[in-house]
Amino acid sequence: MHFLINGKSFDFELDVRISLLDLFREHMGLTGTKKGCNQGACGACTVLVEGERINSCLALAVQYQGRAITTVEGLAEVGHLHPLQHAFIENDGFQCGYCTPGQLCSAVGMADEIERGVPSAVTTDLAAESIELDRDELRERMSGNLCRCGAYNGIVEAIAETFAKESA
Amino acid sequence: MIEFTYARAEDTRGAIRLSSDAAHPKYLGGGTNLVDLMRETVEKPDALVDVTGLSSDIEARADGSLLIGAAAKNTAVAADRAVRTRFPMLARAILAGASGQIRNMATVGGNILQRTRCTYFYDDASRCNKRAPGAGCDAIDGFNRNHAILGASPACVATHPSDMCIALAALDAIVHLEGPNGRRTLKLVELHRLPGGRPDIETELKSHELITAIELPALRFAARSTYRKVRDRASYAFALVSVAAALDLDADGTVRDVRLAMGGVAHKPWRAWKAENALRGQSAVRENFRAAAAAELAMASGLRDNAFKIELAARVIAAVLSELAGDLA
């Protein structure tokens, strides 16, 4: 099977039962992406596929051959953290850090959804051409990422600081 | 997870052929439910036929109808301009379900065929007639807060978990199917079954039949429609009760037409025909909304933990219709 992960090409002989998450962690040494619930409930395994966020635990790797995948390891440029990673540090957006890679990838994908005008459950006007990333929108859109430390206030601040400004 | 073969279908005929070659095949969409069920060995297909490469087009037709390819992702449908303006209840229903990540993976076809989240169905240490026909049901006398109040049977009290399907039921959606013997269509409300004595048989699909598209017939007043979901937390939870509704009033505030469906209450998306019939020709006032809800819920019955849903459903119906009536006033 052929994969494009963080801008590089890889070929693996894989059992079709292997999830994308287990491919990263068990076959590639990319342990940044975390296994929390392994059933799509916690969001710790969130990665980007062609810019769209997905739960890699529910994704059979075989389905994602040849598609551009970005894990948390691919967010930063060499020597430079992604602005969102900086903001997580500045705003205490984590305590134990286990959910952080998923929060980061999810927020990057979420910001792109806002950019594309994808509505959410709390969007008042479905006909609106553009949607502002206010706190209600942000919290609703990030509800697929749990943080058992309860660092939500810092997480929301970090994401708002990074992306709400851009869309304003 | 047991071993299986995987093949990616290039077209609908190819998908059906690949399926027909296997003993216990499953069509694979986003995998958000099926992969989980396979991991729990509740589902044990020997072959997966990946149908995510089939049509995901959303075709807005001049007559006001829509044709949505079954491989369309939930996010793509909810974000589609024609869906948002012509059928807002569908966009709202999809956005009320799951998380952003899951909506990016899940397909329309897979959403329709997702299976109940009854915990006894998932737990192979429990008795479940849906998982193991004839085994019994541990939900009936167990923790059944999330279970059915309408159309249940002594064999099964599970609910259908989809939000999207509730809107599709209200909108008279037509399911386009293709199988080894050709194409046919079914109304969405006729696709899913009530549990009766065979809760393991959930749909009217025949062997190897594939959902290829969903058609939404034009509905003039669907532009003024909505979906309300009541759940145990503000986001990312299954419905206790949900209501999809569209309301069409005359100038004098009489209900000319109405569409109403409920989620979280039954084994299938529950079209509220009795409430609709009770409302047509009545004035759009709260007491009539309550009376219509009472007509629909007359046959409802509660279990140990879920009887509250009967009153909750009545209130949500009245609230949603009042909201729509207010919009139109």
Image (cartoon, rainbow, N blue to C red):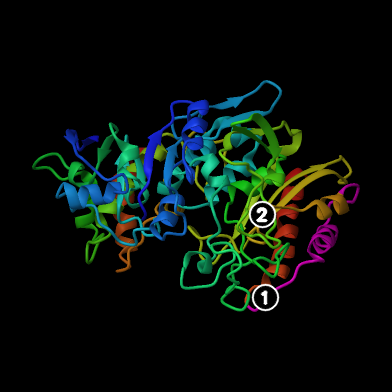
Q: What label sits on residue A82 in the rendered view?
A: none
Q: Residues within 10 Å of mark 2 (few under 14, many from 20)?
A: many
Chain ID of residue with mark 2: B
Q: Residue at x 67, y 20 (%)?
A: B62
The vertical placement of A118 against B9, above or below, is below
Whole-number angstrom distance, CA of label 1 to CA of label 2: 18 Å
Q: Is residue A144 left or right of residue B62?
A: left
Q: Is residue B43 left or right of residue A97?
A: right
Q: Which residues are the magenta region?
A: B280-304
Quadrant of image for the N terminus of chain A: top left
* Towards the viewer: B96 or A158: B96
Q: Is residue B296 left or right of residue B154?
A: right
The vertical placement of B83 against B198, above or below, is above
Count of marks overlaid on the render = 2
* Towards the viewer: B154 or B319: B154
Give the SS element for disc 1: loop
Residue B245, x across and y down, in percent:
71, 48
Residue A125, x across and y down, in percent:
57, 41
Quadrant of image for the C terminus of chain A: top left
User: Can see residue A96?
Assistant: yes
The vertical placement of B2 against B210, above or below, is below
Q: Residue at x 75, y 37 (%)?
A: B221
In primary-sequence order, the first of circles 1 and 2 is: 2
Residue pointed to by mark 2: B268
Instruction: Residue at the far top: name it.
Output: B62
Q: Are marks 1 and 2 in contact (CB under 8 Å)?
A: no
Give the SS element for disc 2: loop
Residue B293, x across and y down, in percent:
79, 60
Chain ID of residue with mark 1: B
Question: Are the residues under marks 1 and 2 on the same chain?
Answer: yes
Q: What label sits on residue B303 in the rendered view?
A: 1
User: Can see residue A138?
Assistant: no
